[in-house]
């Protein structure tokens, strides 16, 4: 590290210089860590806001689906004419599905 034949003042100056260099290095590393911690905090806040938005969207979709199920149940429990319409709609949807399946399989060939 140093030549021990030098005067004690020179050794102290050399150690002070080394300490200052290490302190500056440590200060820059602490600054980088602080910046990184701030970025992580900001990202976590952004993600929490995004998840809160998704939660409200899922709640509104759940409300829409539950309302649709209630209306469907009411229609099924009502008169015979509604059951006949429901049967026609169900058969029509199955036919449309098979028609689309046939058309897509023909296009892929």
Image (cartoon, rainbow, N blue to C red):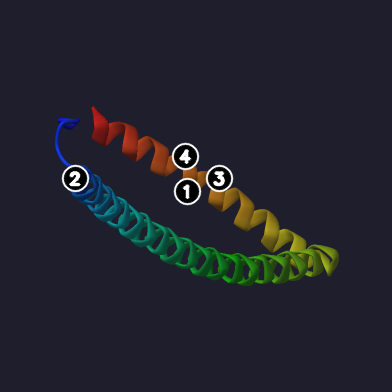
Left or right? Give the position of 10 relative to 85. left
Question: Picture coordinates of residue 79 (x, y %)?
Answer: 83, 69
Location of residue 62 by image quarter: bottom right
Tell me the residue at 25%/36% (across/down).
Answer: 107
Give me the disc on residue 98: 4
Numbered-mark total: 4
Looking at the image, is mark 4 or mark 2 nearer the viewer? Answer: 2
Tell me the residue at 55%/45% (across/down).
Answer: 94
Nearest to N terminus: mark 2 or mark 3: 2
Above or below, comparing residue 104 to residue 86 in the picture: above
- How far apart marks 2 and 3 lie (CA) works out to 88 Å
Question: Picture coordinates of residue 14 (x, y %)?
Answer: 19, 45
- How far apart marks 1 and 3 lie (CA) works out to 5 Å
Residue, disc 2? 14
Looking at the image, is mark 2 or mark 3 nearer the viewer? Answer: 2
Residue, disc 1? 96
Asked whether the residues under the numbered discs 3 and 4 touch, taking CB atoms below 8 Å apart as contact, a structural biologist would say yes
Residue, disc 3? 94
Asked whether the residues under the numbered discs 1 and 3 touch, taking CB atoms below 8 Å apart as contact, a structural biologist would say yes
Q: Residues within 10 Å of mark 2 (few under 14, many from 20)?
A: some
- How far apart marks 3 and 4 lie (CA) works out to 6 Å
Q: Residues within 10 Å of mark 1 (few under 14, many from 20)?
A: few
Left or right? Give the position of 103 relative to 53. left
Q: What secondary structure is found at the residue carrying circle 3?
A: helix
Q: What secondary structure is found at the residue carrying circle 1?
A: helix
Q: What secondary structure is found at the residue carrying circle 2?
A: helix
- How far apart marks 2 and 1 lie (CA) works out to 87 Å
């Amino acid at each position: 590290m140093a030549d021990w034949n030098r005067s004690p003042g020179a050794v102290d100056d050399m150690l002070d210089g080394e300490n200052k260099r290490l302190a500056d290095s440590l200060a820059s590393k602490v600054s980088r860590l602080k910046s990184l911690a701030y970025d992580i905090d900001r990202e976590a806040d952004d993600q929490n806001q995004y998840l809160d938005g998704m939660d409200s969207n899922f709640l509104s979709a759940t409300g829409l689906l539950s309302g649709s199920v209630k209306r469907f149940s009411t229609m099924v429990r009502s008169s015979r004419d509604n059951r006949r319409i429901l049967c026609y709609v169900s058969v029509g949807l199955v036919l449309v599905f098979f028609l689309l399946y046939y058309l897509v399989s023909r296009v892929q060939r």
